[in-house]
Amino acid sequence: MVDVTVRGAGVFGLSIAWECLSRGAKVRVIDPNGVAAGASGGIVGALAPHVPENWNEKKERQFESLIAAEDFWKNVQFWAGIETSYARTGRIQPLADERAVALARGREETSKLLWKGKAQWRVCHADDLLGLVPDSATGQYVHDTLTARIFPKQACEALAKAIEARGGVITTEAEDAGKVVWATGVHDLERMNRHFAGNIGSAVKGQGALLKYDASNAPQVFADTVHIVPHWNGTVAVGSTSEREFETPFDTDEQLDAVLERAYAVLPVLRDAEVIQRWAGLRPKAKSRAPMLGAHPLFEGQFIANGGFKIGFGMATEIARMMAEMILDETDSIPAEFGPDASL
Ligand SMILES: Cc1cc2nc3c(=O)[nH]c(=O)nc-3n(C[C@H](O)[C@H](O)[C@H](O)COP(=O)(O)OP(=O)(O)OC[C@H]3O[C@@H](n4cnc5c(N)ncnc54)[C@H](O)[C@@H]3O)c2cc1C
């Protein structure tokens, strides 16, 4: 009695399973490595929007996903009975020079239309901000109210609990039954690379660190290419490296030390905080750099959800909705640039 089998218990697989369950389907998730064993078992979790300009389908879908996330995670928390760690706490970005200020002011205007009054992007001064406020060479900042934070591993554990609470099954081994969705991240990209003897996608290594520092619900900070993300449990995450070439996928090294140094320069108060975890994982990146959603290129009648790359958590809600519609209703609302053909 299974309508949908989801292979892969990362954020994509679990979110799709959850959405299918919520629409009344009987769902089984299979992952030989357990929940959040891949990229989704990380610690950074910046759900950050694209800048509000040069709008396109990808940015619109991500915007919709970030807006939908609030209700999505509230519902998950209700069923799971444990913290999801999601909160729309916003983000602060210092503006380094007058050119950056001018650009940010232009975006302040375009955001009013593109963000439909559902979130704000504003240029402001330090006096207008609370929380961890870095120095700014111009004295000015962008503060947006769309960015959210989530602790990836905790969010996946909550999703898994919520799925089980509503009768879904999560297991390490079972036969496929019903409609089958592959959400197996790097595993599937490598399988397609072998099959098509080409570059359909690749793994991009990322390293992050977790500091013991309680910044509560302070907005996250993005400066000097570093994300500094206060989490709900008295920690602050710092990330990430972006490595196309690497020898050891799951080890951390001096490249993470360099990210930490940049974070300390942005927010010197963090220098004395204990580093309680160093973490590395592989982001699944499709050749198109966009999510890869739809009919599976290798298995007729089956589906794929892959290519989360750097925004997998931010996109998960909208991806779950589009995939559930396709799997259960045969309704295709997936933009062409997210189709597997974009990378084949
Ligand atoms: C350092 C770092 C920082 C990041 N920061 C952010 C961020 O701030 N914001 C954001 O939105 N995203 C971020 N990401 C990206 C995000 O983590 C990924 O996009 C997302 O986790 C991808 O989810 P997934 O479910 O597609 O893949 P995964 O989480 O990799 O899940 C794939 C699963 O498939 C399983 N599997 C493999 N083979 C099989 C098989 N044969 N059968 C069944 N299951 C199988 C694996 O065990 C794994 O659990 C970051 C990633 C990294 C590495």
Image (cartoon, rainbow, N blue to C red):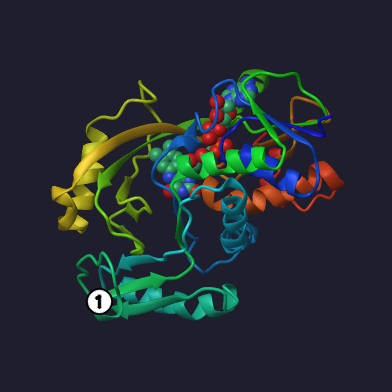
Displayed quadrant of residue 59? bottom right
| Residue depicted at x 62% and y 62% | 64
The residue nearer to you, when weighing 197 against 326, is 326
Reply above or below: 219 against 186: below
| Residue depicted at x 30% and y 80% | 128
Residue 67, horizontal then vertical, whole percent: 58, 64
Is residue 285 something one can see in this rendering? no
Query: Residue 53 vs residue 142: left or right?
Result: right
| Residue depicted at x 16% and y 57% | 269
The residue nearer to you, when weighing 218 against 239, is 218
Q: Quadrant of the C terminus?
A: top right
Residue at the spot of label 1? 126
Q: Secondary structure at mark 1?
A: helix
The residue nearer to you, when weighing 106 against 236, is 236
Residue 87, horizontal then vertical, whole percent: 46, 60
Reply above or below: 50 against 121: above
| Residue depicted at x 38% and y 54% | 232
Query: Residue 148 vs residue 190: left or right?
Result: left
The residue nearer to you, when weighing 186 against 97, is 186
Is residue 177 something one can see in this rendering? yes
Q: Quadrant of the N terminus?
A: top right
Q: At label 1, which amino acid type do we have?
A: Ala
Asked if the beta carbon under badge 1 is closer than 8 A to the nearest atom of ligand 1, the reply is no
Residue 207, horizontal then vertical, whole percent: 34, 36
**Number of on-image labels:** 1
Displayed quadrant of residue 28? top right
Residue 288, horizontal then vertical, whole percent: 59, 42
